[in-house]
Image (cartoon, rainbow, N blue to C red):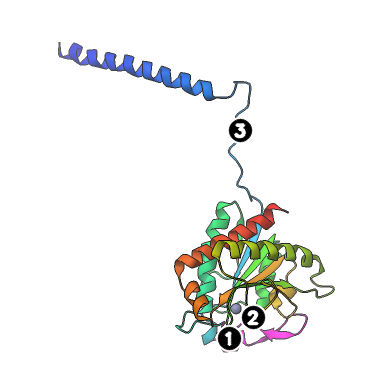
Amino acid sequence: MRARRAAMPTLAALVVLATACGGATSAAQQQQPPATTPLSPSPRPMLAGKVVAIDPGHNGGNADHPEVINRPVDIITGRKPCNTTGTETAAGYTEHAFTWDVARRLAPILRKMGVEVVLTRPNDTGVGPCITKRAAIGNKAEADAVVSIHADGAAASGHGFHVIMPGLVPGHNDAIIEPSKRLGLAVRDAYTRGTGMPFSTYVGKQALSTRTDLGGLNLSTRPAVFVECGNMGNRGDAAKMSDPAFRQRIAASLAAGLRKYLDGQ
Ligand code: ZN
């Protein structure tokens, strides 16, 4: 008796389940494509196969090792220190910490798009590497785009961001001039749209500048730009750059610019 009583509700429940499943299947079948249509494969990440080199300017150990970073290196148009300490806000928020934080926020956004990310330094506690080595890292990775992240240390009266593109160094970076310009435009547009940061009031034209005195641009064989994300010497810009939420917006904006550029390749 006990076994039979237990079996009865189970049987009833099975009937109900079977009915419910049958109904659900019918509804689903109506929405499915005809059996002859092959199922689409899961979509490839939109930027799979692309490589981006992120170069967070300076490094946390630079200030303690002048003997390493002051060593002059050849940047074709002259000689420059291997690396520098960078600037900081009046409150002491350093450029190296800022660039590293933006880089570590940017990398996962790009990876989610399928991009292979290469960083020119693995943390914010090391020394260097020299600008020559940083350029070599992007070149060796055959990066589709290289973005160097910086913050400016200009006079307090100036504010806003700007993007620096490579000027022609004949016989060295001819091939990257045009694509770097496209990269620069895409990054500039996405940056101002995404962060609301105005164009620089003190350098460049429409937040764009071209230079031949930066090792990272002279020595790159891959499309490359520098982004001066704001002026740490300016109170308003410094407040924005010191805010983690704003740095996340910077990272998202840089990713949007890179995506626009890489999509158009
Ligand atoms: Zn810098």
Q: Callout 1, which amino acid?
A: Ala
Range of magenta residues: 65-86
- Compared to residue 213, the image places residue 103 above or below, namely above
Location of mark 3 (residue): 40
- Compared to residue 183, the image places residue 27 above or below, namely above
User: Residue 210, position in %: x, y?
Assistant: 73, 75
User: Residue 80, position in %: x, y?
Assistant: 69, 85
Give the Cα separation between the discs numbered 3 and 2. 52 Å
206 or 219, which is in the foreground? Answer: 206
For the point 82% across and 69% down, the residue is 174
Q: Callout 2, which amino acid?
A: Tyr
Location of mark 2 (residue): 202
Check disc 2 and report its element: helix, strand or loop.
loop
User: Residue 127, position in %: x, y?
Assistant: 55, 79
Q: Is residue 73 left or right of residue 61?
A: right
- Compared to residue 50, the image places residue 6 above or below, namely above
Look at the numbered discs 2 and 1 and tell me whether their residues touch, using CB distance below 8 Å: yes
User: Which numbered dot is residue 155?
Assistant: 1
Give the Cα separation between the discs numbered 1 and 3. 56 Å
Would you identify the image quadrant in which residue 35 lies? top right
Look at the numbered discs 1 and 3 and tell me whether their residues touch, using CB distance below 8 Å: no
